[in-house]
Image (cartoon, rainbow, N blue to C red):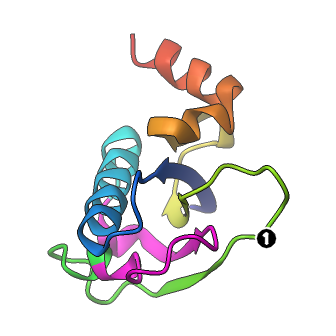
């Protein structure tokens, strides 16, 4: 068994609580589906947001999912780099798994696909 990090990111159009919660939930569900794991397999989830997301904690979306109540979550601000992607939510899901690094599927949604086009391309090819 290995501890692996699964990356993911998404964006929101507006700094509104409901949109932030929906986007976070959608991203986490996509990561789970792409990698086939369960909440009890999770070590922790790190969540970062860009400084223009202030309406709510994205972790609230994960806390409402059945089975995720005991998973340690941590929210923080992304490093504010000039000209970086705005209104972005990033997840680093640390999962206990027997999968190799090459078998992990990282997930980028919406405008966040621009962050790692190389990974988006690999993920799309793997799911064909």
Quadrant holding the N terminus: bottom right
Residue 42 picture location, percent across and down: 44, 72
Q: Quadrant of residue 76?
A: bottom right
Residue highlighted by disc 1 = 79
Give above or below for 126 relative to 5. Answer: above
Residue 107 picture location, percent across and down: 49, 41
Q: Is residue 54 magenta?
A: yes
Residue 31 in sight: yes
Q: How many marks?
A: 1
Task: Judge by depth and name the residue closer to the eye, 20 or 33.
Answer: 20
Task: Judge by depth and name the residue closer to the eye, 111 or 116.
Answer: 111
**Residue farthest to the left, as pictured:** 66
Q: Is residue 5 left or right of residue 8?
A: right
Give above or below for 53 relative to 117. Answer: below
Q: Quadrant of residue 67?
A: bottom left
Q: Residue at x 53, y 51 (%)?
A: 9
Q: Residue at x 79, y 68 (%)?
A: 80
Give above or below for 84 relative to 3. Answer: above
Q: Secondary structure at mark 1?
A: loop
Give above or below for 88 relative to 103. Answer: below
Q: Residue at x 59, y 52 (%)?
A: 7
Q: Residue at x 64, y 32 (%)?
A: 114
Residue 104 in sight: no
Residue 3 picture location, percent across and down: 62, 65
Callout 1 environment at 10 Å: few (<14), some (14 to 19), or many (20+)? few
Quadrant holding the C terminus: top left
Q: Is residue 48 magenta?
A: yes
Residue stretch rendered in magenta on the structure = 38-60
Q: Is residue 62 left or right of residue 96?
A: left
């Amino acid at each position: 068994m290995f501890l692996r990090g699964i990356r993911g990111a998404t964006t929101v159009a507006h700094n509104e609580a409901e949109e932030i919660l929906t986007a976070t939930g959608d991203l986490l569900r996509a990561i789970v589906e792409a990698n086939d794991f369960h909440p009890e397999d999770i070590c922790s989830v790190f969540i970062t947001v860009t400084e223009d997301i202030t309406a709510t904690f994205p972790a609230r979306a994960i806390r409402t999912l059945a089975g995720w109540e005991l998973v340690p979550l941590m929210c923080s601000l992304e490093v504010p780099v000039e000209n970086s992607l705005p209104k972005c939510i990033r997840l680093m899901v640390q999962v206990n798994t027997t999968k190799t690094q090459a078998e992990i599927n990282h997930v980028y949604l919406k405008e966040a696909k621009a962050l790692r086009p190389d990974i988006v391309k690999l993920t799309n090819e793997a799911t064909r």
